[in-house]
Amino acid sequence: MPNAAAPSGPRGQRGARGPRRGGPSRGGISKRSGPRGIKTDKDGDLDMDAPVRQTPYSRGGSAPSSRGDARGGRLTRGSGSGGIRGGTTRSHARGSGLVEITVLGWQESQGNRDSVIDFLERKTNVRIKKSRTQGDALIISVPFLQVAEIVKWDGCRYAGSTLSINAQNVPKITSKGDEDVIMAANPRPSEKSDTIKVLEQVLAQRYNSATKMLDLSRLGEDATLRQNGFFDFASTTSKMFPALMLVADRKFDSAAEKRDAVVSVTLGYNNLKDIKVVSCLAATFSDLKNLSLEGNMIPSWASLDSWRHKFRKLEQLVLSGNPIVTEDGYKEEAMRRYPMLQMLDNVVLDRPVIKIGAAQAIPSGIMPTATHTSSYGSTKTQLPLGVKPGFNLDDSGVGMQFLSSFFTMYDNNRDELLATFYDEASRFSVSANTMAPRTHQVGVSIPPKPWEPYYQTSRNMMRTYAASLITKLFIGTQKIRDAWQSLPRSKHDVSDSKLWVFDIWPVQGLPDVNNPSNLEGVGGLIATVHGEYEEVAEGGKVPLKRSFDRTFTLAPGRGAMNLRVVNDMMVVRAWGGSDAWTPEPQIFAAPVNEEEAMRQAKIVELRRRTGLNAAYAELCMIETGWNWDGAYAAFERAKADNLLPPEAFI
């Protein structure tokens, strides 16, 4: 599949897509598409013709050669326009403006405005750019091409209520957006319904209901797509896959039905250098368990960044045959990106056991019988290094002296604090992180709008426009004083060291206020603080706790302590406790029985060579007395006699 960027929006009228093959040019500058049979993307550097090679999914009777044997699957059901309305006029929206969507019913829920926005962003993977309330309605703004992702959640349940979601100013928005995608992929002057029927036919041929796998490998060699001209022009080649995913998505009535029908997808041997043109796979089949990109030309993990936070339930990933497999830390990065990954390139991954409170068993399917603990790493985060205490590289003690007085003064006398450590060049900003997870506070009632006191000053760059980024950076003592006065009164518990963690290290090149002609600057410190505070409650209410992160840049100054704050950045988030920085005890690996280790090695090798899943590989070894040669011979006999069911394979 070509390495062209996925379409970012409607491309104009059909007549603007360039001259058709065999027809005269319409004038202007056009790009040579190359001789017939050599297909390029709009950069002219990729073809979709690849020599035929066997994919890992063709092993052991689970071959997609039975593409036509897809009876009973949603992807094989009838054809037609599937709800795309008639008419050929493109939507006037170009995807660059924002569309307002009205959300009703949220005020009857147990949540608030911020939690509704967080809920919709999690469910749709769409970043909500703006939001406001108007009476009982929550008005959110998103780019035109992402409206459909929000609107389709109309009628969903949220916190005990039903949300009503609609885009009143964009009638039939989902139909218009779908039409644009289909029209962009339409290679010949045929009806939309004809294009849809062709794509439905391709899906039916490539879907195997027995294994719940959609085989999208070697699309450039697909006879149906070639006969219908999808690869005649570079301008339509890159748009075929988004249209294919759209047609596939509309075959299902619910996300649960789609999740059950398609468990595995292979995109092998499509000449992909990155996944831009196929990135929409993550939106269509977000709950995949098995994914293969074997035999492409993907050079690095950066080429897969479009899927960095996608496929969170992925259990098996195949990238063999790509240059990426030679990268340092290849396996570790795969495990970091996909937390549920169990197999990489048909090899079982040995993850450390996670312990939260009581010990947990290793998830089934990773290792059938062995359970052992990694000799290094964090049991909290699964990262290579465990949680360590704070570090202090400040030999002079200036940093800790500053911090020991700062928070007491911030709670009791902010004006004095400003006069002591800040000047007209000091900078302050605060950001409310409304998406951080919240830890339950016993006896505390979360207010309906918990972040309202911070809206006026918050410089959260995910929710703030460029103009506000300037006005919400407070420079000089007077502007900082005004910002602090708008924030809730606070109380920091400085008596309990377990609630705090400090990191302090030296830095060079800071502005020298005592000698402005010093272009090299002076040395100073950066101090980061993680902790918590209580917002002082009115009327005897239980105070609300907040967690915070604060970073200070400190340099020599003119004040009483000869110290000035160059920059003060504060992030406020829901209270999460202090467990995140509590140092972990060192864990040593339990001794592994040598005989058991040998057995596990045999299971792993048998799985690698045969494609069997863990349970069947172990069963095969047990029945042959753990004899490697005997187990492999037994597998070959069972495979030849068609005795292995589809579920025996990965």
Image (cartoon, grey):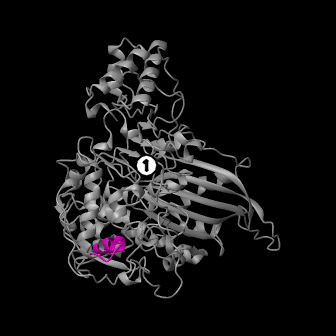
Q: Position of residue 618 (x, y in %)?
A: 35, 21
Look at the picture and state if 310 lies above or below 225: above
Q: Which residue is found at the position 30% from the left and 74% from the top?
A: 177
Q: Viewed as shown, does residue 584 lie left or right of 506?
A: left
Q: Position of residue 97 (x, y in %)?
A: 39, 80
Q: Is residue 520 visible?
A: yes
Number of marks in the image? Answer: 1
Q: Which residue is found at the position 49% from the left and 88% from the top?
A: 27
Q: Say which residue label 1 marks.
A: 268
Range covered by the magenta-colored residues: 179-190
Which amino acid does the dot numbered 1 rest on? Answer: Gly
Q: Viewed as shown, does residue 7 lie left or right of 417?
A: left
Element type at mark 1: loop
Q: Is residue 95 magenta?
A: no
Look at the picture and state if 563 lies above or below 20: above
Q: Residue 513, located in which quarter of the rendered image?
A: bottom right
Q: Which residue is found at the position 54% from the left and 83% from the top?
A: 29
Q: Is residue 118 visible?
A: no
Q: Viewed as shown, does residue 261 lie left or right of 222?
A: left
Q: Quadrant of the C terminus?
A: top left
